[in-house]
Image (spheres, rainbow, N blue to C red):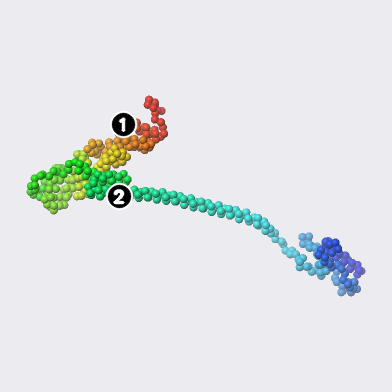
Amino acid sequence: MTRGRSCGIMCAMTNTNSDIPQSENNLPEGGESNGLEQPEGSMETERLPAADRPAPPVQPEEIPDTLRVEASPAEVNLPPGVVPAARQVDTSPLKKRKPAASKTAEGRPRKKSRWLLFSFLSLLALLLVAALSGFGGYMSGISLRQSAASTQVSQVAREQYDLAVQEIQSGEYFRARQRLEYVIRLDPAYPGAVEQLADVLLELNTTATPTLVPTVTLTPTPDLRDVQQLYDQAQQFLLDGSWTSAIDALLALRKSDPEYRKVEVDGMLFIALRNSGRDKILKEIDLEGGIYDLTLASHFGLLDTEGQSLLNWSSLYITGASFWELDWGQAAYYFGQVAPHAPNLMDKSAMTAAQRYRIALVQYAKQLINQKNPCEAVKQLEIALSISQDGETQSLYDQALARCTGQTQPKPGTQTP
């Protein structure tokens, strides 16, 4: 009985180790003993009482295939119920984890796409900054160039104007006229240039023609009339509208006694000179003489609207006449300022401001056509036709319009649809 039990145990152990791979000498891999050899004295265990005999091996419970672990030959002789530490298996639920390779594979495309997006945005920002910087530099360059040009023009105009003033003071009116005309050509609105030119032209005309001041008697006998009598006569001349006689009486009074009723005499001189200048411009067609009287009147008081307007228009008329047949563009510019307000204003040539303006426009349009600028010529001819119409100006207008619009001039005798 004991033999059979011992054989059963040994057979079970032998069957258990039958699945272990062995080498050619029937030893486990590594050359170690499988622990199945009977040590000496093993037979004595059969003679022990039943109480002292080792308990039969307990059959292990059925273990799931997923947790079954094969025992090595060295673990066969372990006491029952003891599981080697190397073979202990955590039966807690296993968490499914993604392989590290998959995380790396998923993370790399995202990092790469983010890096590409960041690079594209950075490049776009750099291009935008470069474009804005270039545009800002371009606008700054244009502004500096315009500012430098205007500064240069204003500097040249100021130098020429200062030289003209010096020449006026030294009596060189002809050279001063040329400088002032050049200043006006550079800057028509240069302060004081038109007024100085009017004074220069007045001086030139005055020196070229007999003086407008009444001729003084050659008799050395002084005027012995009473100062009050001269004053009364001047008042009567003013009431009669005899402006020249009133001026003569007042100047004689002032020469006799400069301090006699000075304020009243200055007021009477202002009235006489203002009205005399107006009559010379509008009635006597003497623009230079009228400018002279109005300029003297402004020294005694503030000119009214009519007197100041006549002074300005007459000065512009004379300035425009100075460009006549020399620069039709400048002539048209100055007469264009006079004609709308005083179309009938004229000088000794008996040509009104409107007539001069129209002629200057037509001549300037011809120059523009020759300079291959027909569209600007059309504008000038339209103004000329609005003043007065004639066949020659209309034909010139048609030619300029055809060149401006790119159309061919119709041949004579053909009918246009």
Q: Position of residue 233 (x, y in %)?
A: 11, 46
Q: Residue at x 78, y 60 (%)?
A: 65
Is residue 380 shown above or below 110?
above
Q: Residue at x 12, y 48 (%)?
A: 252
Tell whether 368 sits left or right of 258.
Answer: right
- Disc 1: which residue: 390
Q: Is residue 234 visible?
A: no
- In front here: 383 or 146? 146
Above or below: residue 287 compared with residue 120: above
Find residue 85 and report its horizontal and vertical position in percent: 76, 68
Relative depth, front residue between 46 and 225: 225
Q: Earlier in the sequence, mark 1 or mark 2?
A: 2
Closer-to-camera residue (24/124): 24
Tell me the SS state at disc 2.
Answer: helix
Is 253 positioned to the left or the right of 128 in the image? left
Label 1 and label 2: CA atoms lie apart by: 45 Å
Q: Which mark is residue 364?
A: none
Name the image quarter holding residue 246: top left
Taking the spot 32% from the left edge, 46% from the top edge, the residue there is 187
Residue type at tag 1: Asp
Work out whether residue 141 or residue 64 is closer to the camera in this orientation and state it. 141
Camera-side mark, 1 or 2: 2
- Relative placement, left or right, of 264 versus 74 is left
Asked if the residues shown at circle 1 and circle 2 are in contact, with their CB atoms under 8 angstroms apart, the answer is no
**Residue drawn where x is 26% and y is 46% of the image:** 176
Residue position for label 2: 159
The percent position of residue 312, horizontal first and vertical second, equals 25, 44
Q: Amino acid at mark 2?
A: Glu
Quarter that holds the N terminus: bottom right
> Quick one: quadrant of the C terminus?
top left
